Amino acid sequence: MKKKLATAAVLIAAAVTFTACGKTAATENTSADTASAAASSAAAQTASTSAAAASSAAAQAASTSAAAASSAAAQTASASAETSSAASTSAAASGTATSETASAAGSGTTASAAAPAQEQTPASLSVISAPAYDSATDSTGRLLVTGTYRQLSLDDTRQGSDGAAYSALKASLATYNTEVKKRVTGDVKEYTDYAKDSLKERGEDDFSAYQEESGVRICRADSAVLSFLESYSTYAGGAHPDTLFYSHSYDSATGAELKLGDVITDTSVLPKLLEEKLDQAYGSDTWLVDSVADTISEAIKGGADAMTLTWTLGHDGITFWFEPDSLAPHAAGSQQVTLQYDAYRDLFSEKYCNAPENYVEQLDYENAILVPGESLLDNSAKNLEVSEEADYDTGNVTVTVTYGNAQKKLKLYGYQTVPYLFSDNGKRYLCLDVEGDDDWESVYFVPLSGDAIGTMVSCDWGFGKYVPVDPENFTMETRCYLLSTYAVNARFSLHAGARPQALDTMALVSANPGADRMSPLTTKEELQVHVLDTEDGSSTTEATLPKGTKLYFYRTDARHTVDMKTEDGRIVRFSVDTDVSPAMIDGRYTEDSFEGAVYAG
């Protein structure tokens, strides 16, 4: 299922802690076994270490605008129901996630006893995956075909991805963006006539618009490699959508697209190795083809009638993806198998198998993964499996988490979620990015430690177009209401625990879709303002802005302060009094001073 990411509605605090992050679920029922006791202990420790921050957050939240405070309160209340129970590891969890090292002995390839000395650990890159849309309608405005796709870029405002060092990679992403846009918009145009005929044949009540949807999953993004999977789904009135997989992996320094032979030193061993691992994971009686090994071998050779072998590089290994109907019947869904760097070290080019130790991994529902122990001496790897069930009548989604022998059900407000695993210095956190009505989005963090699933912590921000890659430096978005309604983004870290801590003192205002900045406000009268002499605002100069001056949103603390830029690049700071309604600046209502403000809701 593809997930549409959007922004959430809440205000942020000044200084280094944002008020919306770090709310713990109101109720939690745990059973009195060892796993539950560990969970309660972890929750108590987390609450103890963050009490001061929670108190500060409560005080700051009281000063937020009424609309946002109401939204945040409603979202907090809706995430109050968690039920927990100890459970035996499910058959699916125990059967589908297997140790690469243990299984390597039977594959014909010898698992490495120890990893050789590695080069310097690559630095994470900040990636933006922005949604883009296309559509076709008939003469009456009836929607016939929709097209959605992603446009990828590096975030130059964030650590690690700016400068000329990645200019070649940026050019490669620009080429990909052009290609996927051409493909989706071309298919929308091609299917329009078919959709018109279907509408006439089926009638208004039985017709559903055709859909072209391209979703992107970032598998790895660092100074060595940028690798992602594209899932392209087409629905044209049949029993189910048709799905194709595409993959792209680039050398981050040169921008060159990698071939399988650039990563795997001996591709001849792959067909038999992958067949054995697929049989182990899905059963040898699953396949449509006579020989999985022969089919993969032909794909590697690149025969005219061969399928395309789809692969991506991740933090722990190379994953091969098989779309529905390629190896197995459509009802069996897609298949995937990962060869881990550490288990098959001799198979990999050293240049690309050295990934950052800390990482964020997007998870698949119903597909268990093996989570390593919390240290090099900890061999207690555990299966992690996540499933979801949405109740569209109540607007709630229930997420079931199985971790080792523990299980917990999380009841959240929203319709769908995207699960991630955050790994930071050996500590693991399940992250759920939840989407609800009106583009509302929020994230929840659940510590995974020992044999316990810890206490869920909510944060009224969402990832939006920003792809989480580094647990110590990731960007989230939310919605702000100072002088207008707009999305803002800021950097966060999980280094201190499950409660995200802001790394920025001010949140940047996100640009309008398809633009490099928001629409401006225009002064309706002459204004006396403070112009920042320095970027941090430690020194200011009074100035006069004439009537008709255009001001562009730049950044805000989302409580009282808004920095805006003039067309000549000066930064103007406004202090907004939100304790009155309408809001005021220097004793004058903002609506008397500006035009062009747009408020949602």
Image (spheres, rainbow, N blue to C red):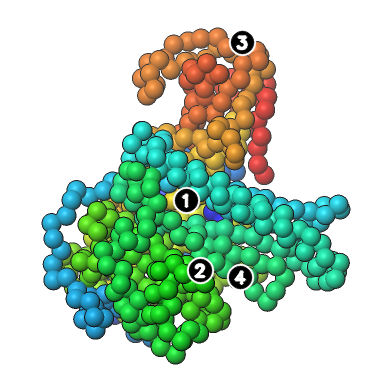
Q: Kindly indicate whether the residue at mark 2 contacts the one at mark 1 (C-beta within 8 angstroms).
A: no
Hey, what amino acid is under mark 2? Answer: Ala
Residue drawn at (31%, 46%) of the image? 223
Q: Which mark is residue 463?
A: 1
Q: Identify residue type, mark 3.
A: Pro
- State which tag comes first along the sequence, 4 or 3: 4
Q: Is residue 503 visible?
A: no
Determine which quarter of the picture holds residue 248: bottom left
Identify which residue is drawn at 37% across, 84% down. Answer: 279
Q: Label 4 is placed on what type of residue?
A: Asp
* Residue 546 circle label: 3
Residue 426: which disc?
none
Residue 505's place in the image compared with 91, above or below, is above
Name the spot of residue 208 as percent of width and height, x first. Answer: 75, 66
Q: What number is the disc on residue 242?
A: 4
Report how far apart the C-alphas of labels 3 and 1 lie in the structure.
Answer: 38 Å
Mark closer to the chain start, 3 or 2: 2
